[in-house]
């Protein structure tokens, strides 16, 4: 049935307690490919994969303590969503300060917007996390729901970002393991689209696809390591649009343009499929 946007938008914010430990951060980092591109004991990789001097990749906030799934984003009044029709449309995170390797926070979540794209709906789920010291992060998660448009809502703006015509300042290829989706899902995204071949076929894919948020984290790690001297705490915000699918076992090509003013434009494509787009309209700000 069509989404009841008015009911969902009027629903009061929900709060849930989040908690995470160093082992959750380590598992997430392994899930986005840490330790796979260099010797596993290389000091540059150990800062992601060993609890001593552990730093937190900012994209971890999308799964911290269970992330959006624990907040009940898909069970808001007015939303009756079939997971087989769901794709992750876009993601934005804003860091108010570095994420601790262990912590507790309260996540306040709500539906910030619902857009009617005709044959599909786009839902923007907002999450705001804070601990005893104050705000930690804010996330906007865009969910693309096929077949759920036509409810009469606003179409929403198109925020496309044209890439510079010049060559990128940085380019890197990142091979992605065949079992990457199976490892990444252990951080809490249990959608069978990323593991079950039969479910993937029902959703219109010939085999399971990689989580969009896994490509998101993998790309951020590559940019942090290549451009920001390996210091994840320098990231202030990170936004993207999930422009296409990516299959485990493929190689991700990441290009980065320096726009000045501590702003980077990024694209991610599949080397194996003639640079088919994976992430687009991607911006990282840093200090």
Image (tube, rainbow, N blue to C red):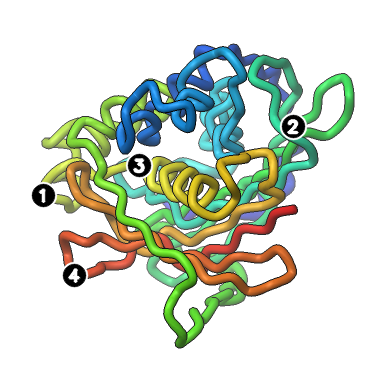
Residue 49, placed above or below residue 177: above
Expressed as whole percent of the image width and height from the top left, the position of residue 19 reads: 65, 15
Residue 150 seen from this side: no
- Label 4: which residue? 274
Contact check, label 4 and label 1, Cβ < 8 Å:
no
Q: Please report whichever mark, 4 or 1, sits nearer to the chain's N-terminal start.
A: 1
The numbered dot on residue 206 is: 1
- Label 2: which residue? 129
The residue mark sitting in front, 4 or 2, is: 4
Numbered disc 4: secondary structure: loop
Expressed as whole percent of the image width and height from the top left, the position of residue 104 reads: 72, 16
Residue 81, placed above or below residue 172: above
Identify the residue at image location x=50%, y=27%.
Answer: 48
The CA distance from mark 1 to mark 2 is 37 Å
Question: Badge 2: few (under 14), some or many (20 or more) residues near its Cα, within 10 Å?
Answer: many
Identify the residue at image location x=13%, y=44%.
Answer: 207
Residue 223 seen from this side: yes
Q: Please report whichever mark, 2 or 3, sits nearer to the chain's N-terminal start.
A: 2
Residue 111, placed above or below residue 199: below
Image mark count: 4
Question: Badge 4: few (under 14), some or many (20 or more) residues near its Cα, within 10 Å?
Answer: few
Expressed as whole percent of the image width and height from the top left, the position of residue 217 reads: 46, 42
Q: Please report whichever mark, 4 or 2, sits nearer to the chain's N-terminal start.
A: 2
- Is 6 on the left-hand or right-hand side of 252? right
- Label 3: which residue? 211
């Amino acid at each position: 049935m069509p989404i009841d946007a008015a009911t969902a938008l009027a629903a009061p914010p929900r709060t849930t307690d989040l908690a995470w430990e160093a082992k959750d951060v380590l598992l997430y980092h392994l899930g986005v490919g840490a330790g796979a591109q260099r010797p596993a004991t290389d000091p540059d990789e150990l800062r992601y994969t060993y609890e001593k001097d552990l730093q937190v990749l900012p994209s971890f906030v999308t799964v911290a303590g269970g992330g959006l799934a624990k907040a009940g984003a898909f069970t808001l009044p007015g939303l009756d969503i079939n997971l087989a029709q769901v794709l992750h449309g876009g993601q934005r995170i804003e860091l108010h300060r570095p994420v601790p390797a262990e912590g507790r926070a309260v996540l306040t979540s709500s539906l910030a917007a619902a857009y009617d794209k005709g044959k599909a709906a786009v839902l923007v789920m907002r999450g705001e996390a804070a601990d005893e010291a104050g705000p930690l992060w804010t996330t906007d998660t865009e969910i693309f729901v096929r077949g759920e448009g036509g409810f009469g809502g606003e179409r929403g703006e198109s925020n496309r970002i044209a890439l510079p015509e010049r060559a990128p300042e940085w380019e890197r290829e990142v091979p992605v393991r065949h079992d990457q989706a199976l490892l990444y899902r252990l951080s809490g995204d249990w959608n069978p689209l990323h593991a079950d071949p039969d479910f993937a076929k029902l959703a219109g894919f010939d085999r399971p696809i990689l989580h969009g948020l896994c490509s998101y984290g993998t790309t951020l790690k590559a940019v942090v390591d290549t451009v920001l001297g390996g210091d994840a705490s320098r990231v202030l915000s990170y936004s993207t649009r999930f422009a296409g699918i990516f299959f485990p076992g493929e190689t991700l090509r990441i290009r980065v343009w320096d726009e000045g003013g501590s702003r980077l434009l990024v694209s991610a494509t599949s080397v194996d499929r003639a640079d088919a787009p994976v992430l687009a309209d991607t911006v990282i700000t840093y200090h």
